[in-house]
């Protein structure tokens, strides 16, 4: 065995003659990439021809934006960078929204970006665009192939940066450079990048431990970094040792187990009041694996919960995020799991018995119970035809323990933040702070491909569904058994709520109509259900889970039962000065 290993090492030290397409594909194989998302195009057809032999599955989507969302979710579930590809020009520019979303979500991704051929660059040729410039602000880096012999090296650089900086990287290659001859190595990932991160500066860790040890009312916020680093169990140990309530960051409801006595749910818009009240009076906050985003820590339910005077300990792998949105007492640049393990080790050493606080446990339990009762009471109010909260409640009752749920942006999708609970990690795939509609369904497809045996659901409003329903064809064609739960209130409801509260019920562009989505799904080869009673939701979900086929549940919900506006701080009552518009001034309401 030792001799064989040495032979492999020696072989890796020798350059091999190959085509650029072969170099790209073999580098993907070395990175254990088993699927690539996109739409077929002539620019990369030489590379594409190698995929079946290499064992790489090409997933052809109906719109390139979907490819990016699929790759984003695939990475969040599997931990492996997603890879997308498209035709130069429009194929690549169609990916802008989903790549920007992945960038804000900190999802490692490589965008294989064929560009105009070297002989025609700058001549405004067919399907030419300056793709590098377009993607510079929405990726961690743009890597351009300028020499055929650098193809494999440049792709390795793209993967190295994608993992190191947690986000998408553009690998731009002129389309003629897929052809020709070159010599290079095919290296294993551990020969050109390392994912091992330490726990941070020891002195900073010691300061954090001292603060936690002496805190009277410590609290924890666990974020995606804890999930990505497989460090949630380490955060649980700290919480138990300190009897500290632990919240999840906005739209990462899987960052701390919901059924744990100290787990209080998510903060942020339409999150958990239990989390907000538990955090409000904290004197020390340990924020692990989170940038503490500005939007994700805004007041919600009129509760200004983020503690102003608490000593904040922030752990993040990216030094750019430390202290970016909230003043900190201690910043630890390190891996969320490694840092949590070290903090726990030192806490256990310095306070072996821990802090057993039965009163705190009872208080947390009461906060959770009160919030659960409030959610149920709100859901049980009558709706026409269904209260959207009731629909969410009925849905969550039948979700299997290992279910993965993606959620879009919008009124019902955001309200779902209060109802979704997870006890396993890598289960909650949300649109996050880029906030683009049309995310949830392609993301669910990517999550399903990452974990084929898990039941996967997408929560989508009817507006967002209009942007993604074409991918039902992809699900049917590729046999991806995702369940799309379309909450249909015949409106862009988040914006409609703004028009209700700030524009005297004047609806411009917010009311929409659509075909019967269940019938559309059936015409595309999927299962389709029209639901107008809350009692129908559970049985329909159970039925589609048994069928294990792509399915669409068109759930009609009340369009008047709306959540509060997303950004009260960004909206103002309308003022009009020109006589022509005076009747629209809020001072004229009721006249």
Image: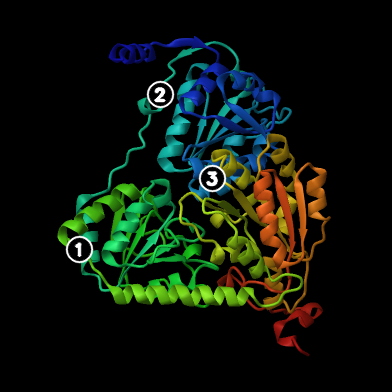
Looking at the image, is mark 3 or mark 1 nearer the viewer?
1
The residue shown at (46%, 56%) is: 423
Q: Residues within 10 Å of mark 1 (few under 14, many from 20)?
A: some
The answer for how far apart the CA atoms under marks 2 and 1 are is 42 Å
Residue 426: percent from left, percent from top: 48, 49
The residue shown at (51%, 73%) is: 372
Residue marked by disc 3: 137
Residue 375: percent from left, percent from top: 56, 73
Q: Residues within 10 Å of mark 3 (few under 14, many from 20)?
A: few
**Residue 514 visible in image:** yes
**Earlier sequence position, callout 2 versus callout 1:** 2
Q: Residues within 10 Å of mark 2 (few under 14, many from 20)?
A: some
Residue marked by disc 1: 210
Q: Residue furthest left?
A: 350
Residue 116: percent from left, percent from top: 65, 26
**Observer-nearest of 30 and 207:** 30
Residue marked by disc 2: 188
Looking at the image, is mark 3 or mark 2 nearer the viewer?
2
The answer for how far apart the CA atoms under marks 3 and 2 are is 30 Å
Q: Residue furthest bottom?
A: 591
Q: Secondary structure at mark 1?
A: helix
Residue 16: percent from left, percent from top: 45, 10
**Earlier sequence position, callout 3 versus callout 1:** 3
Instruction: From the viewer's perspective, tell me whether residue 521 is left or right of residue 44.
Output: right
Instruction: From the viewer's perspective, tell me whether residue 583 is left or right of residue 315.
Output: right
The residue shown at (49%, 40%) is: 78
**Observer-nearest of 442 and 550:** 550
Instruction: From the viewer's perspective, tell me whether residue 354 is left or right of residue 228.
Output: left
**Observer-nearest of 90 and 307:** 307
């Amino acid at each position: 065995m030792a001799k064989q290993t040495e032979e492999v090492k020696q072989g890796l030290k020798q350059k091999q003659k190959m085509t650029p397409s072969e170099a790209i594909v073999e580098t993907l194989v070395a990175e254990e990439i088993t699927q690539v998302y996109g739409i077929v195009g002539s620019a990369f057809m030489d590379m594409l021809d190698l995929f079946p032999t290499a064992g790489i599955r090409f997933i052809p989507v109906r719109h390139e934006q979907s490819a990016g969302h699929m790759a984003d979710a695939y990475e969040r579930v599997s931990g492996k960078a997603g890879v997308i590809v498209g035709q130069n020009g429009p194929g690549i520019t169609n990916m802008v929204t989903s790549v920007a979303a992945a960038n804000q979500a900190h999802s490692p991704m490589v965008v294989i970006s064929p560009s105009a051929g070297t002989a025609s660059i700058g001549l405004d040729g067919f399907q030419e665009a300056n793709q590098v410039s377009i993607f510079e602000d929405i990726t961690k880096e743009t890597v351009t192939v300028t020499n055929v012999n650098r193809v494999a090296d440049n792709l390795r650089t793209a993967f190295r940066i994608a993992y190191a900086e947690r986000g998408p990287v553009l690998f731009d290659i002129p389309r003629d450079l897929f052809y020709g001859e070159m010599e290079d190595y095919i290296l294993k990932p551990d020969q050109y990048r390392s994912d091992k991160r330490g726990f941070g500066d020891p002195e900073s860790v010691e300061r954090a431990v001292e603060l936690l040890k002496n805190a009277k009312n410590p609290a924890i916020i666990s974020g995606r970094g804890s999930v990505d680093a497989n460090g949630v169990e380490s955060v649980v140990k700290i919480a138990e040792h300190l009897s500290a309530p632990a919240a999840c960051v906005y739209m990462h409801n899987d960052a701390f187990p919901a059924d744990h006595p100290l787990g209080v749910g998510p903060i942020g818009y339409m999150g958990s009041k239990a989390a907000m009240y538990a955090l409000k009076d904290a004197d020390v906050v340990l924020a692990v694996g989170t940038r503490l985003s500005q939007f994700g820590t805004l007041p919600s339910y009129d509760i200004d919960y983020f503690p102003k005077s608490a000593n904040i300990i922030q752990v993040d792998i990216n030094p750019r995020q430390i202290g970016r949105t909230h003043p900190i007492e201690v910043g630890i640049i390190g891996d969320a799991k490694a840092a949590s393990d070290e903090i726990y080790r030192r806490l256990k050493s310095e306070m072996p018995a821990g802090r057993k606080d039965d009163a705190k446990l009872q208080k947390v339990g009461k906060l959770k119970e009160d919030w659960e009762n409030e959610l149920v009471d709100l859901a049980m109010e009558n709706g026409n035809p269904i209260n959207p909260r009731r629909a969410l409640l009925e849905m969550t009752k039948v979700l299997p323990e290992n279910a993965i749920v993606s959620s879009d942006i919008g009124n019902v999708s955001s309200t779902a933040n209060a109802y979704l609970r997870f006890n396993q990690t890598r289960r909650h795939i949300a649109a996050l702070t880029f906030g683009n509609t049309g995310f949830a369904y392609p993301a669910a497809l990517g999550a399903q491909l990452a974990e084929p045996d898990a039941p996967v659901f997408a929560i989508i409003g009817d507006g967002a569904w209009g942007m993604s329903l074409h991918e039902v064809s992809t699900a049917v064609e590729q046999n991806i058994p995702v369940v799309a739960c379309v909450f249909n209130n015949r409106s862009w409801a988040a914006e409609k709520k703004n028009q209700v509260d700030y524009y005297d019920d004047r609806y411009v562009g917010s009311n929409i109509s659509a075909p019967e989505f269940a019938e559309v799904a059936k015409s595309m080869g999927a299962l389709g259900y029209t639901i107008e009673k809350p009692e129908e939701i559970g049985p329909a979900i159970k039925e589609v889970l048994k069928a294990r086929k792509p399915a669409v549940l068109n759930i009609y919900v009340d369009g008047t039962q709306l959540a509060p506006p997303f950004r009260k701080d960004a909206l103002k009552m309308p003022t009009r000065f020109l006589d022509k518009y005076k009747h629209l001034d809020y001072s004229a309401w009721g006249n």
